[in-house]
Structure formats: C-alpha cells, structure tokens
Image: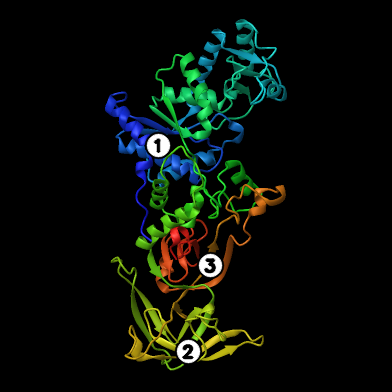
Amino acid sequence: MSKPENSAASNFLRSIVQADLESGKHTQIVTRFPPEPNGYLHIGHAKSICLNFGLAEEFGGRCNLRFDDTNPAKEDQEYIDAIKADVTWLGFSWAGEERYASDYFEQLHAWAVMLIEAGKAYVDDLSPEQAREYRGTLTEPGRNSPFRDRSVEENLDLFARMKAGEFPDGARALRAKIDMASPNMNLRDPILYRIRHAHHHQTGNAWCIYPSYDFTHGQSDALEGITHSICTLEFEDHRPLYEWFLDNLPVPTKPRQYEFARLNLNYTITSKRKLKQLVDEKHVSGWDDPRMSTLSGYRRRGYTPSSIRTFCDMIGVNRAGGVVDIGMLEFAIREDLDANAARAMCVLKPLKVTITNYPEGQKENLELPRHPKQDMGVRVLPFAREIYIDASDFEEVPPAGYKRLVPGGEVRLRGSYVIRADEAIKDADGKVIELRCSYDESTLGKNPEGRKVKGVIHWVPAADSVECEVRLYDRLFRSPNPEKSEEGGSFLDNINPESLVTLTGCRAEPSLAQAQAEDRFQFEREGYFCVDLKDSRPGALVFNRTVTLRDSWGGQS
C-alpha cells in the first residue's frame, strides 16, 4: 500500500495564519501549547503540539510552552518534567524558557480586584451544591445569587480576607457578574477565584486562592502576545467568556481564539482522568506503559517522533471531528520502521535443531544484510551443528497451506541452507523437544536446478545466540469504543486480557547483544521491536513489540 497523500492542505488554520500575515494583521505569529500539569501527554496532545509548534515553524513565528497550573491539588513536578521531555522528543523547541500561568498570579489578582471595583465581580457565599442549583439548566435560566448585589466595599473586603486565608476551602468564591439568564452557561456568573489551601509546585504557600482556568487562560495569552489561541472544539462555547475578559480588562493585546476538532482514536482512551485511573489501580505499569496512549508509552513501545508527526499530518486539521482508525497510526509507524529499522532474527519459542550431517565443532560465519533496501552494512550470523528455530515452524500434522517443516519435508533457513526434518525427539508427554535434521551443503544462498523449496524460516545459532525477554504488546482495549461497556459497566470492562504477553527464554541473533535502549529492529516474520527504555540492560535484554508486520488499515496484508 502506498503512503496516503499528504493531507496538510486540510489544515484550515494554516490558511487563516497565512491570510493574517499577508494582510498585515500580524507581522509575526505567536502560538502556545498550554497543557495542565495534571498528567502525562497523550496522542491527542500530539495533534495540538504539531499544530501549534508546526504553524510557528512554518511561518517563522514562535510557540510558547505554558503550563496552565491553576489547580495545585492535581498537579505535580513529575508531570511538568514529562511534558517537557515529550515535546522535546517530538522534535520541537519552545520560545525562551517554559512559562507558567502562576507567573501571572499577581497580575491576575490585580485584574480581579479591578473587576470588583468596576462592579463586575462579587464574592459569593453559595456552596458548590447551591451554586449548581442557582445556575439553571440548558433549558432553564439561572437565578441571581442572593449575594450578587453586595457593595463594592464589601466584596473588596471579603476578597482580601479570602486571600489572607481567613476562610476554609469552598466557603466562598469570586464570580464575574455577567448574565445568569444567558443561553451560554459559561456566561452565568463564572467563577474567577476559588479558595484552596494547597501547596503549589511553583509558588509554594504564597497563595490560598487560585484563579479558574477560564479566568487565567485568555489573560495569559494576552500577556504573552499570543496571536492565534488554538484549542479544541469543546472550548468553542467558552470563547464568548474568553472575549468578555479581554474586553473588560486593560490587557496589552487581544488574542483571537480558534477551535479545531480534537483527535478521537478508536480502541483508545485519552481522558487524563481515566488514564490516571488505569495507573492508580495498576491495570498498567505506569504512565509510560507501552499499552498506554501517552507519548511516553508510545515512545517506550518503539514509536518514532517522525511517525507520530506523520500521523498528525495524515489526519489533518478540521472542525468536523469524527473517529480516526488506529490503523492509520499503526500504518505510520510501519512505514517508518520498514524504511529505517535494521533486520534481525529472534526465535520467540525456541526449538532445538541438531543438523546431524554438519561436522561437530565446525562453524561458518554467514553475512546477512542489515536492511534489504538500504546500505546499513551486514551482520554476521554463525552457522553450526546446533541451531534454534521457532516451535511453530514444525508440525507433525500440518494444516492446509502449511509451508514450513514437516516430517521428511524441507525448508530454507533464512540466508543459509536448505534443511530436511528427519526425526522428532519427544519428551515423556509427547511434546517435541528437538528436531534432528540434515542439510544440503550445495544450497547455501540458492536452490539447485529442479529443486523447489517454498518455505523460508528464521533461525539463530544455539551457542552464540543471546537470551532475551520479549513482550508482545497489543491494543489495551478490545472494543473500538472502549468508553461504552455492555450492561452499563465501566470502560475497564473493555480491557484486553491479552494486551501483554511476556515471553522469556527467547533467543536473538548475536548481533543484538550490543543493542541499546530504543534501538529498533524488524524481527523477521515476527514484527517490529525495540529495546525497552526502562527495563532492558546489557546481559538482560528486553524487547517490546511495537507493531506487527501486517497492516490492517487500507486493505494491506
């Protein structure tokens, strides 16, 4: 299957940016990637990263990395470090130092006081439950809080006391005074500040009131001179509030918000809350478990930055939404690894083969190319009397169409000789534990005239091969829509029990003995694998299966 046509033309935001520059509306574009540091980045964030950083790169602008850190109870330095590492791994660089919304807490507080002084904000004593009741519904307008008409002086006093720590969490909140009857729920007196007696990873204990995301986001954009504030469609209804703040405060610039469809990938969960649940309840080994949809998980599984960027380009940028087939992501990594991953052989379920007519003590070093199409050099594979093949490559009673070893049958060993199965040695339970075969020394690298050998199998030398562990990863969820479970159950009910199969005692060809973390290979006939980033070490190699050889997307087999 050929690679899909580059879909960059579907990026409507590129057209907007280009038009703004050509018209002189902006002389330089400034974008930002603004994650909340309350979890690891996932594949959906990759789309936003590629979009924001990519536009800045293409048009000679700059892109800021800003942590919207307004909820210290859920944030952690671990997440900040992981986010920075992931953005860098994808191949992007942010302008200057990373920024934090908490850098602007003093200014945001001053602007909140200005809104109070202008009669556009008030301190509300309603409990969270009461506030929800007063807010109304999508079909019914809200009601004004009984505290909405407090005087400016009283509101200033109460807000100052909130800041001084006089009140417990949730006792009071500062709200904007907009319109409780607005059809847009976001304009029904939204919260500006909450009381949270929580230590903040950047500001320590300096604050016990924290601004809301909505109050922080637009003003942070304005302070940074963001020209194109790009977010996903769920924030479209927040745009009037975003603009209300900018219109009612003396901000230095007025950014414009644009929305695009978020990435919805089948067989995949991208809710940070649910990803955290998977980690906390130990359904996976951590945020970087190779079955997770996090960028750290994809990296550990063996995905490349270029494959993820290619995938994001393939799916394009639009407002239509929809669900993307995970096969497109798997296609992108297969294309990358097919072109760039060195070839090697690894026997996952070793079956000993003794070549009875090969001289004892003799060894010959065979040279095999490291890649069939690129000049990556050769690797040396010693051939001797004892080798390993995969147990599945021998069947006493073969199924229809079987082209591997059978009693009395022949196969070619990849890059080596033709061998014939002469005898199967079994244990007391009748399990085949060894094959005794003979080889034809005239068949090295060729089929003699008139001789047809259809089957080709992989192998490794018994004495020189490297013992290793191989982890066969599959999709974490069985259902294309893991959010939906039968009979009203949890998304956890859709976890695939076969998403990880660990094989020990596997045997890899000797050229892999020096493989380093994140080295990637195609194990012939088995799939694409990488050396595990965390658990592998010299003398105890661990390989993770990145993806199988078969491409199910677009009809390729």
Position in image of residue 227 (x %, y %)? 38, 27
Residue at left offset 46%, top offset 56%: 330
User: First in sequence: mark 2 or mark 1?
Assistant: 1
How far separated are the C-alphas under marks 2 and 1? 59 Å
How far separated are the C-alphas under marks 2 and 3? 31 Å
Q: Are marks 3 and 1 in contact (CB under 8 Å)?
A: no
Q: Secondary structure at mark 2?
A: loop
> Which label lies toward us, 3 or 1?
1
Instruction: From the viewer's side, name the closer residue of 3 and 381.
Output: 3
Q: What residue does disc 3 label?
A: 469
Q: In this rendering, is residue 379 above or below 105?
A: below
Q: Which mark is residue 52?
A: 1
The crowd level at tag 1 (other Cα within 10 Å; few <14, some 14-19, many 20+) is many
Position in image of residue 485 (x %, y %)? 67, 50
The crowd level at tag 2 (other Cα within 10 Å; few <14, some 14-19, many 20+) is some
Q: Quadrant of residue 96?
A: top left
Position in image of residue 182 (x %, y %)? 59, 19
Q: What residue does disc 2 label?
A: 409
Name the amino acid, label 2: Gly
User: First in sequence: mark 2 or mark 3?
Assistant: 2
Side of 366 where 47 appears, left or right: right
Name the amino acid, label 3: Glu
Q: Are marks 2 and 3 in contact (CB under 8 Å)?
A: no
Q: Secondary structure at mark 1?
A: helix
User: First in sequence: mark 3 or mark 1?
Assistant: 1
Residue at left offset 41%, top offset 24%: 255
Q: Which mark is residue 62?
A: none
Name the amino acid, label 1: Asn
Q: In this rendering, is residue 405 above or below 113?
A: below
How far separated are the C-alphas under marks 3 and 1? 39 Å
